[in-house]
């Protein structure tokens, strides 16, 4: 009954009787609020992917798309794109162990010195293989560095210092940090031992990392062939060592841990890669759970006969993190800001475009399993329903900070492609300024769903309210007190600011969809080069 009443109220708000197109296509603050209140209600139990609450949320999104005139966009003629999930939960620490052997092998203690986890390939097992040191696992043809040069990794376990060189900018570091295990897998490694540094422990110390390990849930998607997607195919186990244990492991090797850490950040440095004369026997155990979830996909066809087969994809993740364990009175993580707001704003933008379509077609996708590792977007970006080459841009909505009156915005990724002009035009019309990223060390451009489309060579942007007028303080307060907590509730949100943000995103999407030329990466842009150029795998 509750969902029916809320749907009725939302539909009525969204279709206020008017014949004035300018009024009808204005943002609806009341409609956005009604949608957020339902999506962040206790009834949906935190919208965890694969759980009943998420199914309710996705049905609501499909009903709302239909109510505002957004056509079904999935392959079967509905609004639902099924996404199979393999959800991975860690086994007990005592079942995940590592034993080193060889003349140079140190004695390491589980929990105190190291921790072990399985990867996507197997639920449990044992691997025994020689160790090979490969620096930071960093390969970059721009500067001629290849940390794997001179060694054979096939059937072996790679040992690498975590992260990527500090002389790279933060977004490049984020890319190379994620890429290193893919490079290991390409070279035939069966596992990896990551060596933490003091710097890598500044944000989360060793004890906190062990706590996260016990509480973590990760996932991947399952393709139509029934196989789990694995970008590191062949690698089945991973261990992580704290700095003290890392120093023991490299004691007596061709380079010490201290010297290696000092050298990795020198531009032009070459670290030796070598067989370590040590064998590791790693036992791992985790729990696999297969589940079915779904992306919600809607289409607004374009009006230009020559451009309507090109699509601008607008995304917002619909899922959140579900229900906490424990004895607290409030255990439901409602995720009002993260990301009921983005989902509700996308509905409002879709409603307005259904009444006034642009030249190119628009695809609206409410994504599943972002919180498990960008899984729904990874699946959709590789299975776009329309031909992938017809997808020309992505505009992502994720946790816009709507607790203050914003005066500027951060347009992550805009400067990397010809999308910049569309964003700048919309911001100027709204009297809103551009701000620099106040947290460049976070590499935010690589941490939300738009990055899945970037990885497929598709230019993308991700907009956030900026640091001006107290925005920096508001963002810090939310992260410190409410992010991924049951306190992320509706009463934090200023819905007049949600309407302003919807208006800005509507204008940006229209500007992109009406561009004369297809959006392209700027010449020599790093991500354009990596994912849509000569560095592409």
Image (cartoon, rainbow, N blue to C red):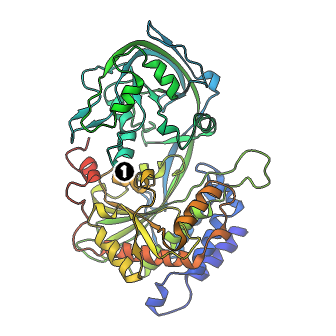
Can I make out residue 513 in this image? no
- Which quarter shows the N terminus? bottom right
- Picture coordinates of residue 425, whole percent (x, y): 32, 78
**Residue at 58%, 29% in the rendered image:** 286
Q: Residue at x 46, y 22 (%)?
A: 247
- The percent position of residue 43, horizontal first and vertical second, equals 71, 60
Who's the residue at 56% across and 70% down the image?
Answer: 402
Q: Whole-percent x and y of residue 385?
A: 37, 56
Give above or below for 500 relative to 228: below
Compared with 295, 401 (above or below) is below
Which residue lies under the disc numbered 1?
Answer: 171
Asked if 247 appears above or below 197 in the picture, the reply is above
Res. 148 image quadrant: top left
- Left or right placement of residue 359 versus residue 44 in this view: left
Which image quarter is the C terminus in?
Answer: top left
Location of residue 357 by image quarter: bottom left
Foreground: 3 or 23?
A: 23
Helix, strand or loop at mark 1: helix
Residue 102 spot, x, y in % from top left: 45, 7
Front residue (pair 290, 88): 88
Outermost top residue: 103
Q: Residue at x 27, y 62 (%)?
A: 417
In this rendered view, identify the residue nearer to me: 279 or 264. 264
* Residue 431 appears in the picture as rendered: yes
């Amino acid at each position: 009954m509750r969902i029916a009443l809320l749907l009725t109220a939302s539909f009525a708000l969204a279709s206020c009787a008017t014949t004035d197109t300018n009024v009808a296509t204005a943002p609806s603050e009341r409609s956005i609020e009604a949608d957020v209140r339902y999506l962040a209600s206790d009834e949906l139990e935190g919208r965890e992917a694969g759980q009943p609450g998420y199914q309710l949320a996705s049905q609501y999104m499909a009903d709302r798309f239909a109510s505002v005139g957004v056509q079904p966009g999935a392959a079967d003629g509905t609004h639902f794109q099924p996404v199979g999930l393999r959800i991975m939960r860690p086994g007990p620490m005592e079942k995940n162990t590592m034993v080193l052997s060889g003349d140079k092998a140190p004695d390491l203690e589980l929990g105190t010195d190291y921790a072990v986890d399985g990867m996507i390939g197997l639920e449990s097992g044992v691997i025994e293989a020689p160790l090979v040191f490969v620096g930071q696992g960093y390969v970059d043809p721009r500067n001629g560095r290849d940390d794997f040069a001179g060694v054979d990794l096939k059937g072996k376990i790679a040992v690498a210092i975590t992260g990527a060189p500090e002389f790279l900018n933060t977004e490049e570091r984020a890319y190379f940090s994620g890429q290193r295990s893919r490079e290991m897998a390409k070279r035939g490694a069966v596992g990896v031992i990551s060596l933490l540094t003091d710097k890598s422990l500044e944000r989360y110390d060793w004890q906190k990392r062990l706590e996260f390990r016990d509480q973590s849930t990760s996932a991947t998607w399952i393709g139509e062939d029934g196989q789990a997607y694995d970008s590191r195919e062949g690698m089945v186990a991973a261990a992580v060592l704290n700095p003290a244990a890392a120093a023991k492991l490299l004691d007596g090797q061709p380079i010490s841990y201290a010297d290696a850490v000092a050298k990795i950040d020198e531009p032009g440095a070459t670290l030796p890669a070598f067989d370590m004369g040590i064998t590791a026997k790693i036992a791992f155990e985790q729990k696999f759970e297969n589940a079915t979830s779904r992306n919600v996909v809607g289409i607004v066809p374009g009006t230009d006969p020559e451009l309507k087969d090109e699509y601008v994809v607008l995304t917002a993740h619909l899922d959140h993190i579900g229900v906490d364990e424990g004895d607290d009175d409030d255990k439901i993580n409602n995720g009002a800001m993260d990301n009921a707001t983005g989902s509700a704003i996308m509905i409002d933008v879709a409603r307005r475009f259904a009444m006034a379509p642009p030249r190119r077609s628009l695809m609206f996708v409410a994504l599943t399993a972002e919180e498990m590792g960008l899984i729904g977007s990874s699946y959709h970006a590789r299975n776009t329903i329309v031909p992938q080459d017809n997808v020309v841009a992505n505009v992502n909505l994720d946790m816009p900070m709507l607790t203050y009156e914003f005066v500027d915005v951060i347009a992550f990724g805009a400067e990397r492609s010809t999308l910049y002009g569309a964003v700048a035009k919309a911001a100027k019309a709204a009297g809103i300024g551009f701000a620099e990223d106040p947290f460049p060390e976070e590499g935010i451009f690589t941490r939300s769903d738009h990055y899945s489309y970037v990885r497929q060579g598709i230019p993308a942007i991700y907009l956030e309210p900026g640091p001006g007028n107290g925005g920096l303080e508001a963002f810090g307060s939310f992260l410190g007190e409410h992010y991924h907590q049951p306190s992320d509730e509706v009463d934090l949100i200023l819905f007049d600011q949600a309407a302003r943000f919807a208006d800005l995103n509507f204008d940006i999407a229209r500007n992109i969809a009406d561009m004369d030329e297809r959006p392209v990466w700027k010449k020599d842009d790093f991500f354009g080069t990596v994912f849509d150029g000569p560095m592409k795998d």
